[in-house]
Structures are given as C-alpha cells and as structure tokens.
Amino acid sequence: MSIRHGLLALLERGQMYGYQLRSAFEESTGSTWPLNIGQVYTTLARLERDGLVRSLPESEAGQRPYEITDAGRADLALWFATPISRADRPRDELSIKLALALTTPGVDVRAVVQTQRSATMRALQEFTRLKYASDKPEDLPWRLVLDAMIFQAEAEVRWLDHCETSLVRHRPAPSRPATHPEAVDRADEEARR
C-alpha cells in the first residue's frame, strides 16, 4: 500500500491533521507499517501540491487539518479499482539473497535457508498469536492484515522447503579449465561450422 493512497483513504473518513493520520494509519494496518511523522507531512505536501488534498486553517492548538478534494477522491477510487501488479511490489530480497548465495564462494546456502526458515517460523507463530488475541469486530482490518502476513509466511516456508529440495538435487556444473582466448575463439568458430 502506498502511503499516498493510505492517507487519501483516511481523509475520505473526514478531516484530520498529521498526527491523527499517522495514528489512524498505524491502527488500520495493525501497526505492521509504522509511519514516521515526517513521511506523513511530506506526503501531505505532495498531495496538496497535486491538488488531491487541501489544508484548512490551523486550529487554536496550532494543528492544521487536511481534507480530501474531488480530484483526491477520483484518484483514490482509481487506486481501489486497479489491481496491484507483481511489478509494483518491492523486490523480493530473500530470493535475491539465495540466488547470490548459490553463486558466492564459501557461502553455506543450506545454512542460509535454515536460518531464514527459523526466523519465518518464529514470525508465523507471533502473527498467529496476535491474530487470536482479540476477536472484536472493530479489529477486523487488523486481523485481515495479520492473515495476509500469515499466508505470506506460510508461502515463504513452502518456498524454502522447495529451495532445500532443489539444493539436494543440485549438481554444480563442472568448472571448465581456463583456456587461452584464441583457443576459445577457434572452438567457437568450429562449432558454428
């Protein structure tokens, strides 16, 4: 979820100032995505610049509330109607890490897999514990976020199992002896004939 659209969705509920937006964002996501207040105000400034929100006069306490504009509502509606593409998601650091571990001399790839599996299993247990800590109706958004995190952790464990099985079957290609570049060029020429 982008912070931009998260703030627009919260402002659709009504006017809010920065600290209220940060609290509501964290509450809506079950504190799984903590926001820095600087991120909130930077995003609000961009949203205002783009005409998606407008700032209102400061309150007596010095707080400046914001409200969503019609253009902001249209942008938010488009975001809700558009599916998230796999390309829109951040890179999967774990798959990149394992791919690099396979090709980096001296790295015990099985140990990398086991370390990750242990961490993922601990996270899965914690997510499950949190999910069942409360069943109040107002906790449904938070529980749905936890469900997504549980499903992702379960999928990661299954993928790590697959990686481990693939490692058992993996036979590295024999290393070719170093040859003189001219000999390689002649061999390539003969292969093309």
Image: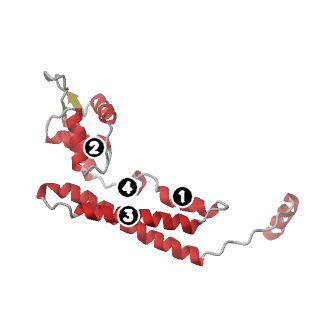
3 or 105: which is nearer to us? 105
The mark lying in front, picked from 1 and 2, is 1
User: Which label was assigned to residue 97?
Assistant: 1
- Spatial CA distance of label 2 from label 3 is 31 Å
- Spatial CA distance of label 3 from label 4 is 29 Å
- Sooner in the amino-acid sequence: mark 2 or mark 3: 2
35 or 6: which is nearer to us? 35
Q: Position of residue 154 (x, y in %)?
A: 36, 68
Q: Which image quadrant is residue 25 in? A: top left
Residue of label 3: 122
Q: Residue at x 43, y 62 (%)?
A: 119
- Spatial CA distance of label 3 from label 1 is 20 Å
Residue of label 4: 85
**Residue 192 in the figure: left or right of residue 116:** right
- Spatial CA distance of label 4 from label 1 is 22 Å
Q: Taking 137 as reference, is 159 above or below it?
A: below
Asked if the residue at tag 3 contacts the one at tag 2, i.e. Cβ–Cβ closer than 8 Å, the answer is no
Q: Residue at x 39, y 66 (%)?
A: 121
Amino acid type of the residue tagged 3 in the rendering: Arg
The mark lying in front, picked from 3 and 1, is 3
The mark lying in front, picked from 4 and 1, is 1
Amino acid type of the residue tagged 4 in the rendering: Ser
* Badge 1: residue crowd in 10 Å (few <14, some 14–19, many ≥20): few
